[in-house]
Each structure stands twice: as C-alpha cells, then as structure tokens.
Image (cartoon, rainbow, N blue to C red):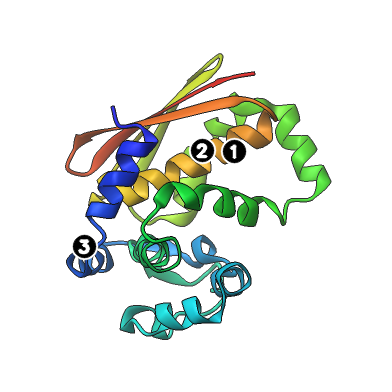
Amino acid sequence: MQTLPALAAAARQAATPYGRERLLTLPGTIGGEALRAWEPQVRARYGAAIVAALRAIPAFATLPADPDPATRLPIGLPTALTTVLVETALDGDWLALERPLREDATAPLGKARRVLLRALGPQKVLAGAGAAHRSLYDRGTVEVRTEAGEADLRIRGSALFVEPAWLLLQAFALRATVGLAAPGAEVEVTARTVAEDACHLSVHWTR
C-alpha cells in the first residue's frame, strides 16, 4: 500500500516531459468540469507568471480558462496540467498542493450543500463515487464498498488510474470529501496498484 508521501515522491519522479506526453496521449476523455475555472484559480493563488508558464506549453496554450462542462478533454490532461503546476509553482512539493486544492474546490459550496453532506455522512457520500466517475470519464468503472469508518474504491479501465499523480489527486479529493461529510475527522487514504489499468484506494476515518 502506498501512503500519500510515497505517492508524492513517485509523482515527482514521474514529472518529466516524457511523463507529461504519455499522460496526454492516453486513450479516453474527461469532462471539462474537471478543470472548472482552473486559470482564474491559478492566477489568483500563484500569479500571472505561473499562468504564462503553463500557457507556454503547447498542450495547454489553447485550453479554455474555464472549460464548459460538456467539453471533452484528453483523459490525462488535467493530471498533466497539475503536474506542471506543482513543478512550477510548488517546486515539486505535491503534498503542498492538498490545502489549496481543497480550498478552491470547497469554496463554491453553499451552506445548504454542506449541511446535506454532513447529514448523509461519509459512507453515503462515498457510495456515489461510481456515478461521479461516470459523469466525468468515458473510460473505467468504480466499485465502492463501505463500512463504518472505512471505504474501499476499486477503480479500473485506464492506465491513468495507476499514475501516482492521479492517485494522489484522488486521495486529496477523498480526504476533502470525508472532511465535508464528517467535519473534524482524521482521514487516511492509501493506494494499491493491482493491474496495469486498475487500483484500489482505501479510506479510513475517525472522529
């Protein structure tokens, strides 16, 4: 099982031009919602120079600043863009990305949505991971098993799903989701690759 620090180390090691090109050429697409308002958020948090550095890479030069949710993007593009962001703005420190990602993702949530998430609790919220995956990706499936204080997500169907950077981003998202559904909970996420296109993510939380 890989912990967050292990995934972060692996993601940094894979952050090469070759690794980026591999991500960009993986078969499949992802919905534009995955990069909602990415440019305004990057500009506000890291500055115009970082946006310019990202735009200097041909693959990101014409990427809409706030893609329409109906737009289909290469499946590995959000992970590739985030990899360059971490290398450029955070000196390769992937773990430093978790807090700003969580803040930017949760800031738009209104009070009613937050109350609903707390009412449902982590188990019911995480049970919807399969539907959330289908709404974004045209590849792969997510099988979710939940018990009190834990969940296991079995994801398969794309080589993207074993990339350390992608796994780390999912771990951040899972920690943020449980944190919304159970404020103050301690959340641990570990990952395990089980095939060339499949992984397991294990989530444990305690109040």
Q: Is residue 157 visible?
A: no
Q: Going from the N terminus, do you reach mark 1 or mark 3 first?
A: 3
Report the residue marked by disc 3.
19
Q: Going from the N terminus, do you reach mark 2 or mark 3 first?
A: 3
Percent coordinates x, y for residue 205 in the rendering: 55, 22
Q: Is residue 187 visible?
A: yes
Q: Amino acid at mark 2?
A: Leu
Foreground: disc 2 or disc 3: 3
Q: Which residue occupies the foreground of this view, 102 or 134?
A: 102
Q: Amino acid at mark 1?
A: Thr
Percent coordinates x, y for residue 28 in the rendering: 30, 61
Percent coordinates x, y for residue 173 in the rendering: 51, 44
Q: Is residue 5 left or right of residue 111?
A: left
Q: Which mark is residue 48?
A: none
Q: Residue at x 26, y 63 (%)?
A: 23
Foreground: disc 1 or disc 3: 3
Report the residue marked by disc 2.
174
Q: Amino acid at mark 3?
A: Gly
Report the residue marked by disc 1.
177
Residue 179, relative to residue 54: is it above or below? above
Report how far apart the C-alphas of labels 1 and 3 lie in the structure: 28 Å
Residue 111, relative to residue 126: is it above or below? below
- Give the quarter of the image for residue 81: bottom left
Kindly check if marks 2 and 3 are in contact, taking CB atoms under 8 A apart as contact.
no
Q: Residue at x 47, y 27 (%)?
A: 188
Q: Which residue occupies the foreground of this view, 67 or 204?
A: 204
